[in-house]
Image (cartoon, grey):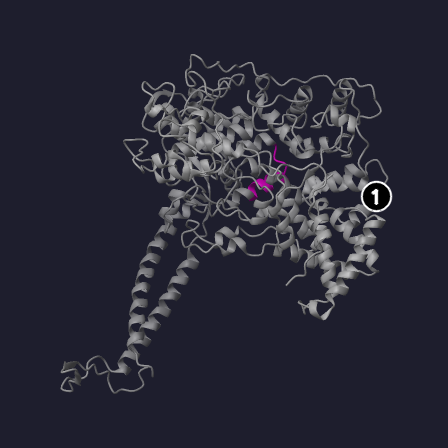
């Protein structure tokens, strides 16, 4: 048993420093859940009788706004937030207690469960009451006069009063806004703080004491720029920044929803993203590869495979495989990820009706949907496991030389026959084994089977009967022959498997054999079709001479071209805003995935345009070049020092008068623990632990131990199964992989502190860190100083060092008492050091970035 830390040290370790987020996470995901899972069902199944447009309001119950749900009708409140069991709506959906909704047919159980989950999470619902909430006549027409739809300009760099402060044009834009508000920037960060910041921001790992010393010793003006270039060139950079993209790509390795079917080959897409980021593939090309990689020309077979894997973006989304309209839902997910991730628009809101706020008519939604109707999505997401190559070809992309498929099918047919023969032989062997006597058939006395008769309660053997069955020696000979046949058959099966061509599979998309325009689905319903709309793009986005979709291909290639045209005003703005957000803690547009009317306008509109123009025209869509520009600014190098007057004028720090203090993401916290303990394996693991589980559905007799096995690699490679997100990641606000999520929540929960104090993983890293410190030469003062530098990137103050030394000494003395010797494997001194190291790892300073 591990000794308990003193209460004072626990408090010091777990109290957050500086501003913290509320324990209540934002409702963004809950709103997405309502819009995707609840509103469409209400519109389709309930509005006819229970909305402002209903001819006769059934039961005086109105379900087209939240107030109506809460108030209820004649029988009482329809929804009691957080209490699905007390909500009449659930009883009605389940057709219980005389309540039936809809009356003609019960909804699928998966849909009812969605309503239960929605109510249990507070019944978040943005709809407000009005006289005719769904009336087109009373709804204001969404305007095309939206700042984000205007052409990107290249504004002049503004003049500033304090000309000695800026080091780049970006600084001049920022300082001009500060000076207009009578604000001034705070002092620069210390070299130690800056180095720790840029290391975590670019590679997601802490600098070593040796790297801190080298930076401090280099006084040349180019020292910092040299560090930045080294970090951008590091393979660790791609692992760090790929994770940012995977957040908005809603990456996971299972289908999620009610049937969490595993997607065995999704890991290939994750690796593609890491490699693409490291190679600094231009952002426009990066998007084209993911939307239409299979339609691009490839210079080699390896390049063709890479481009096929890239289309995994369109295949890795959550899928409801139990009820609903799977094909249309998959298309809706694809449009949602493209809209939010690339354009910063909520396109999916136009599935059932014209967008209520942005200029996206339903016709535009289905013009885009037609492109994906003409696309086949292959994700392996079948509830039934694909048992042969023909089944796999229907649910997976095949990578490499498909000319070998004929040979594979031939071999697999032979293999299936051999497997069937082996199964019959195995049954025969087992039956013979049961009939063999214990001596294995060495005695040839026969195997008599007497029959018996029961008379007057007495049992008498009928000895007139002759012995039945084969003699043991004959049974043994037969058994031996069957065993040999099985052995020979196993060799044949192995030999045949060895000859099978090595095929690789992936999740992704390809064009259907027949491509065509599609109809509008009235109210998003499968069975109600309206007019056919030509495949195309958003009519409100001003792209000159947009590419025309033909009847030769799906239109994905033309869509990718339209998105990446230099005059598309949304794509570059959204991209540079995301980069800014990751480096400064908040975007110039804080609603980073919503550039529509419901989003926030930019805090620095001219700077945003200047960056977008430079990104496309100057840097040719290079993300590394844009990141380098930003981290070399004077603004990025500011400290996070509090200035009361500036804080009163700008509490959100939107004018960037100081650097925003923020918590590290879950992956960076975990990776940093492994790094400082010396246990981080920076090599790329082969495939994913998910592949060791095999085909199937989580929770249905599948061994999930590979998901929880020790994993010393970087967290970006951890298995992400939607129903079983790793505990460490989940506790520290890992994004819901069901939806694109550009900004992570930042909660402060008691469970996080308890985890840091009790988790075997954290304790193991603390033990390893303590061993590292004790192995160093010098006294405990030197070791304490090094422990601070390794974990926090700074030297301890005199008071900190004295308190740490006192704690280690007194704890070792206490643990050395006979009654406290619970762990005989380590010395009291080692245990005391482990506890001290755990304090450092569990402390707020370890997981926050100044």
Depicted 565 relative to depicted 709: above or below: above
Question: In this picture, is 295 found above or below 230?
Answer: above
Mark 1, residues whose alpha carbon is within 10 Å: few (<14), some, or many (≥20)?
some
Q: Secondary structure at mark 1?
A: helix
Q: Quadrant of residue 52?
A: top left
Residue at image position (72%, 38%) is 18
Q: Is residue 610 left or right of residue 342?
A: right
Q: 649 or 739: which is nearer to us?
A: 649
| Outermost residue to the top | 137
Q: Quadrant of the C terminus?
A: top right
Q: Which quarter of the image is occupied by the N terminus?
A: bottom right
Provide residue 288's location: percent of width, then percent of height: 53, 31
At 39% from the left and 51% from the top, the residue drawn is 408
Q: Which residues are magenta?
A: 271-282
Can residue 397 be seen at all in this image of the molecule?
Answer: yes
Q: Is residue 550 visible?
A: no
Q: Nearer the viewer, residue 804 or 296?
A: 804
Residue 193 in picture, x, y percent from top left: 77, 40
Of residues 281 and 666, the one drawn nearer to the viewer in this rendering = 666
Horizontally, residue 308 falls left or right of residue 796, namely: left
Is 279 in the magenta?
Answer: yes
Residue 389 on image: x %, y %: 38, 49
Question: Circle 1 sits on which residue?
Answer: 216
Q: Quadrant of residue 460?
A: bottom left
Q: Is residue 380 magenta?
A: no
Q: Position of residue 631 (x, y in %)?
A: 73, 33
């Amino acid at each position: 048993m591990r000794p308990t830390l003193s209460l004072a040290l626990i408090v010091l370790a777990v109290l957050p420093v500086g501003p913290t987020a509320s324990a209540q996470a934002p409702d963004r995901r809950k709103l997405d859940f309502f819009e995707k899972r609840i509103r469409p069902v209400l519109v389709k199944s309930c509005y006819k009788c229970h909305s402002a447009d209903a001819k006769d309001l059934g039961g005086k119950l109105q379900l087209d706004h939240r107030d109506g749900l809460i108030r209820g009708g004649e029988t009482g409140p329809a929804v009691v937030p957080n209490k699905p069991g007390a909500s009449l709506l659930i009883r009605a959906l389940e057709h219980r207690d005389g309540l039936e909704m809809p009356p003609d047919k019960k909804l699928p159980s998966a849909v009812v469960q969605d309503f239960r989950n929605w109510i249990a999470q507070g019944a978040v619902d943005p709809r407000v009451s009005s006289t005719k909430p769904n009336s087109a006549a009373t709804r204001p027409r969404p305007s095309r006069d939206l700042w984000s739809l205007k052409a990107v300009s290249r504004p002049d760099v503004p003049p500033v009063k304090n000309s000695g402060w800026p080091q780049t044009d970006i600084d001049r834009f920022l300082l001009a806004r500060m000076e207009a508000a009578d604000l001034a920037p705070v002092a620069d960060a210390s070299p130690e703080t800056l180095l720790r910041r840029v290391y975590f921001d670019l590679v997601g790992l802490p600098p070593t004491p040796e790297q801190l010393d080298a930076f401090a010793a280099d006084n040349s003006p180019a020292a910092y720029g040299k560090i930045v270039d080294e970090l951008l060139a590091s393979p660790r950079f791609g692992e760090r920044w790929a994770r940012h993209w995977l957040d908005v790509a809603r990456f996971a390795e299972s289908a999620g929803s009610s049937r969490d079917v595993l997607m065995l080959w999704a890991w290939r897409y994750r690796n593609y993203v890491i490699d693409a980021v490291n190679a600094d593939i231009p952002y426009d090309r990066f998007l084209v590869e993911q939307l239409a990689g299979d339609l691009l020309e490839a210079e080699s077979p390896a390049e063709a495979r890479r481009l096929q894997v890239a289309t995994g973006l369109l295949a890795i989304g959550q899928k409801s495989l139990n009820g609903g309209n799977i094909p249309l839902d998959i298309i809706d997910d694809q449009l949602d990820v493209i809209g939010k991730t690339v354009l910063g628009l909520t396109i999916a809101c136009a599935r059932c009706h014209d967008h209520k706020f942005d200029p996206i008519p339903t016709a535009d939604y289905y013009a885009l949907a037609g492109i994906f109707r003409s696309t086949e999505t292959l994700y392996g997401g079948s509830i039934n496991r694909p048992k042969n190559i023909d089944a796999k070809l229907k649910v997976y992309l095949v990578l490499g030389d498909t000319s070998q498929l004929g040979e594979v099918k031939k071999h697999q047919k032979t293999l299936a026959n051999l497997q069937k023969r082996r199964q019959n032989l195995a049954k025969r062997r087992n039956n013979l084994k049961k009939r063999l006597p214990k001596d294995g058939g060495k005695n040839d006395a026969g195997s008599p089977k007497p029959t018996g008769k029961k008379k007057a309660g007495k049992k008498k053997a009928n000895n007139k009967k002759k012995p039945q069955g084969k003699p043991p020696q004959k049974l043994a000979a037969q058994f031996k022959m069957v065993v040999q046949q099985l052995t020979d058959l196993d060799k044949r099966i192995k030999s045949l498997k060895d000859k099978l061509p090595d095929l690789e599979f992936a999740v992704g998309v390809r064009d259907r054999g027949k491509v065509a325009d599609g109809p509008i689905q009235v109210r998003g319903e499968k069975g109600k079709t309206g007019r056919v709309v030509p495949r195309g793009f958003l009519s409100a986005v001003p792209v000159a001479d947009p590419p025309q979709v033909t009847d030769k291909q799906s239109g994905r290639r033309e869509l990718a071209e339209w998105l990446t045209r230099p005059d598309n005003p949304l794509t570059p703005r959204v991209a540079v805003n995301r980069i800014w957000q990751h480096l400064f803690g908040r975007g110039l547009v804080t609603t980073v995935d919503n550039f529509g009317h419901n989003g926030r306008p930019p805090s620095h509109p001219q700077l945003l345009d200047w960056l977008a123009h430079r990104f496309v025209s100057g840097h040719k869509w290079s993300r590394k070049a844009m990141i380098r520009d930003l981290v070399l600014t004077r603004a990025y190098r500011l400290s996070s020092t509090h200035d009361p007057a500036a804080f009163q004028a700008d509490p959100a720090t939107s004018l960037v008068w100081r650097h925003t203090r923020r918590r590290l993401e879950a992956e960076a916290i975990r990776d940093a623990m492994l790094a400082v303990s010396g246990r981080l394996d920076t090599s790329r693991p082969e495939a994913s632990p998910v592949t060791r589980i095999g085909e199937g559905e989580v929770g249905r007799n599948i061994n999930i131990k590979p998901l929880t096995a020790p994993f010393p690699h970087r967290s970006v490679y951890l298995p992400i199964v939607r129903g079983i997100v790793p505990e460490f990641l989940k506790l520290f606000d890992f994004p819901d992989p069901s939806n694109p999520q550009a900004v992570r929540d930042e909660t402060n929960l008691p469970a996080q502190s308890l985890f840091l104090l009790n988790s075997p993983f954290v304790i193991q890293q603390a033990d390893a860190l303590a061993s590292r410190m004790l192995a160093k030469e010098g006294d405990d003062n030197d070791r304490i100083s090094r422990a601070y530098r390794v974990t926090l990137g700074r030297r301890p103050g005199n008071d900190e060092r004295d308190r740490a030394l006192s704690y280690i000494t007194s704890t070792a003395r206490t643990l050395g008492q006979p009654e406290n010797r619970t762990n005989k494997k380590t010395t009291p001194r080692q245990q005391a050091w482990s506890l001290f190291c755990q304090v450092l790892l569990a402390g707020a300073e370890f997981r926050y970035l100044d």
